[in-house]
Amino acid sequence: MTVMTTRITIRKPDDWHLHVRDGEMLKAVLPFTAKNFGRAILMPNLIPPVRTTADCIAYRQRVMAALPQGSNFKPLMTCYLTDDTDPDDVERGFRDGVFTGVKLYPANATTNSAAGVTDYNKVMRVLERMEKIDMPFLMHGEDTDPEVDIFDREKAFIDRYLSKWIRQFPKLRFILEHLSSKDGADYVKSAAPQVGGTITAYHMMLTRNDWFGHGLKPYMYVMPVIKTARDRTALRKAATSGEACYFLGTDSAPHPYARKVSTNGVPGMFNAPVAIETYAQVFEEEGALDRLEAFASLNGPKHYRLPPNDETITLEKTSWTAPEEVKVAGPDERALVYRGGETIAWKVAG
Ligand code: DOR
Ligand code: ZN
């Protein structure tokens, strides 16, 4: 006889890859993450990007000011790597507890990445310093060579760059963010524990057939792009395997409606309102609810060498309807929500 689990309590999860933006958008979206997550790694791809310790201190203050009263959510900040990043400033920011890691955006790989790295030779000094001070290196791991097909960008980045860097910097800790392919998931396991990888819920839920197989769904356009059923299966198996190298990173990335639904739409999917609930669904479908806590709350802190959260959250098998959109004050107006209008099977209690 199988007994259906209807309630599960886990240590409070962390989100190891999140965009909360700035200004009115920040105020509108941050509470969704602060409600269920203890900490989140905040992406630095603002306009202008968070490039220095000084930029980061100012951004962190704006984030703290946008938190709901009484919240003890902790933002973990990142430094946006450019061709000109100063290793001394990175080191200072890390030692002072301002930066948790440095984030690589290859130039023009995705949203707000125009100031990203154009030539990897220019940042080798920063990587050397990070290795020396044991500071994590977060990567948008896609090769932007125009000759590389968009579905092969993750694999090309691994083959051409990451596989060399892990030998060049044997003590540097890497995070290949938002794994989107079987190749990416397999690579992380082969290079663990030096390399860890985050996985979004939507890369485990969707395939490119969902994205443009029956009408085009602009809100499913993300970077790295959603791939095949084979890739999705590999990511689901990886996340639910219990392997310590895989951990939760939603890549929740809100945009104003008009920029998403446009003739030249931007990548990014706002999923914070349904994040932990959607991961719970995937783990339930894979018969692995007992491994949700490792993926959501333990493996990430282990890789980042931080203690797990002391608090817990409880998820219940109670259905509710996700909001279609979230209102944003001012000219941005609203952001579309992933799974908006759908019935969500799990709900966070309390
Ligand atoms: O889909 C994405 N959106 N991928 C990224 O790498 C960036 C993000 C954003 O900032 O909107
Ligand atoms: Zn992202």
Image (cartoon, grey):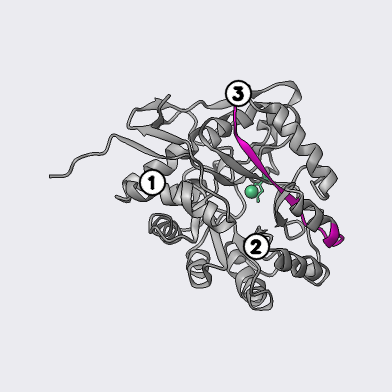
Q: Residues within 10 Å of mark 3 (few under 14, many from 20)?
A: few
* Relative height, residue 118 to residue 121 (above, below): above
- Span colored in magenta: 71-88
Q: Residue 70 shows which numbered tag?
A: 3
Q: Earlier in the sequence, mark 1 or mark 2?
A: 2
Judging by the rendered image, the residue that carries numbered circle 1 is: 282
Q: What element does badge 2 sit on?
A: loop
Upstream in sequence: badge 3 or badge 1? 3
- Marks 3/1 in contact by CB < 8 Å: the verdict is no
- Magenta stretch contains residue 85: yes
Quarter placement of the C terminus: top left
Task: Tell me if 202 is positioned left or right of 16 in this view.
Answer: left
Estimate the spatial distance between the alpha carbons at disc 3 and disc 1, rounded to whole Å: 31 Å
**Is residue 334 on the magenta stretch?**
no
Residue at position x 54%, y 59% in the image:
197
State how far apart marks 1 and 2 are (Cα): 25 Å
Which dot marks residue 142?
A: 2
Q: Earlier in the sequence, mark 2 or mark 3?
A: 3
Queried on whether the Cβ of the residue with tag 2 lies below 8 angstroms from ligand 1, the answer reads no
Q: Is disc 3 placed on a helix, strand or loop?
A: loop
Q: Amino acid at mark 3?
A: Gly
Nearer the viewer's eye, disc 3 or disc 1? 3
Residue 112 position, x and y percent, is 75, 47
Between marks 2 and 3 in the image, the one whose residue lies nearer the viewer: 3
Residue 72's spot in the image, x, y percent? 59, 31
Characterize the local packing of mark 2: few (<14), some (14-19) or many (20 or more) Cα atoms within 10 angstroms. Answer: many
Taking the spot 49% from the left edge, 42% from the top edge, the residue there is: 13
Mark 1 or 2, closer to the camera: 1
Where, quadrant-wise, is the N terminus in this rendering?
top left
